[in-house]
Amino acid sequence: MAKLTMKGLLKKSKARTPTELLKHTRDLLIFVNGDMDVREQKRKDKMEELTKSMLGIRTLLYGDGESEPNKDACAQLTLEFFKDDTFRLLIVSLSKLNLGIRRNATHVVANLQRQQVQSRLIASEYLEKNIDLMDILIPGYEDSDIALSYGAILRECIRHQVVARYVLESNHMKKFFDYIQIPNFEIASDAAATFKELMTRHKSTVAQFLSNNYDWFFQEYNSQLLESQNYITKRQAIKLLGDMLLDRSNSAVMVRYVCSLDNMRILMNLLRDPKKTIQLETFHVFKLFVANENKPPEIVNVLVTNRSKLLRFFGDFNIEKEDEQFEADKAELIKEISILEPKEIKEFSSILSFSENCEIPC
């Protein structure tokens, strides 16, 4: 049996024009996605052809390592790929493809999301008209066989603001809190990467989403992620929270978040975490509560009630590497807590009860 080599695969693929290559690939995908009653050998042969064909498309888009891709050929392939709805066909066929084809398909999709034809992002225009594809990709996290492939493709699609807006405004957003906590580490990490992309890439869209969905979003975020028993989940959530709150586009959301006593309670408890990395990420968020010039009376009084323990904790709080910004932030935090004066509030008894649960250990 002849040995299948990269050189041989590329040689055969180069014989086809972009249009011919794509048509051949479409025909193979239709076959693979069709009747399951065909004999096994024929299906195997078609799968080998598809392996060569998908590699040919990838090579056309990325080059072969010796020569750069041809811009005209890339433009032609991009137009044909989305005009003929090959993207949808590829997605619905993905679960039937082997790992090698999936990997090449993911690279192809990633490249096509960035291809511009006469200054037009063809992928963005296509996805706006076929936004229902997100309803196929996102639930893919529930299928361990295709979760990582669908996740990689989903993140590429989220590069387009129209797609990110659709996902943020959909019921799928609530499912991400479950996906991030899936027992399978790889899938959970992939879902967390997609969630981070959603919450950080398109600033104005994210700011609008957080403003419109503040209550339910942060209730879920706090209870499921920040208070998670899983170290990785908790650490990633604190880091992302800091990134979101410190983004200028989210300034109104940040002010609202740091005026909440319940939110500060969670952060004070996280400062007690035995993991130094958790404490450090928490510090970067907790300092926003202290720096807030318009702290509500209940927050001021909790800080005053816990002043001695907070000052002792932060006085001993150091990191391994020298960091002038960290030291400056810590000094400012200590100074601010030191000069706080208690404020009169109506329900001080509840504050005392709260502070008993949020003391910083000596």
Image (spheres, rainbow, N blue to C red):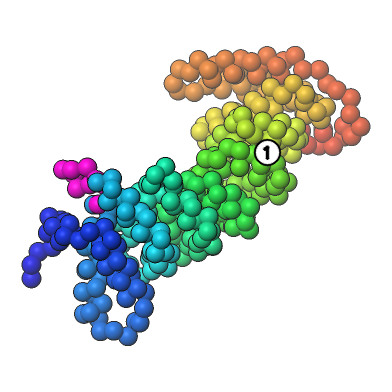
Q: Position of residue 215 (x, y in %)?
A: 73, 46
The range drawn in magenta is 60-69
Along the line of sight, the residue nearer the viewer: 84 or 164: 84
Q: Residue at x 82, y 33 (%)?
A: 351
Q: Position of residue 346 (x, y in %)?
A: 91, 32
Relative to the observer, which residue lies in front, 361 or 130? 130
User: Along the horizontal axis of the image, is 261 left or right of 236?
Assistant: right
Front residue of 256/286: it is: 256
On screen, residue 185 above or below 293: below
Left or right relative to 122: residue 288: right
Q: Does the magenta portion include 62?
A: yes
The answer, for residue 145, to whether it is visible in the render is no
The residue pinned by badge 1 equals 266
Seen from the viewer's position, the closer of residues 275 and 140 is 140
Q: Is residue 285 left or right of residue 194?
A: right
Is any atom of residue 140 visible in this view?
yes
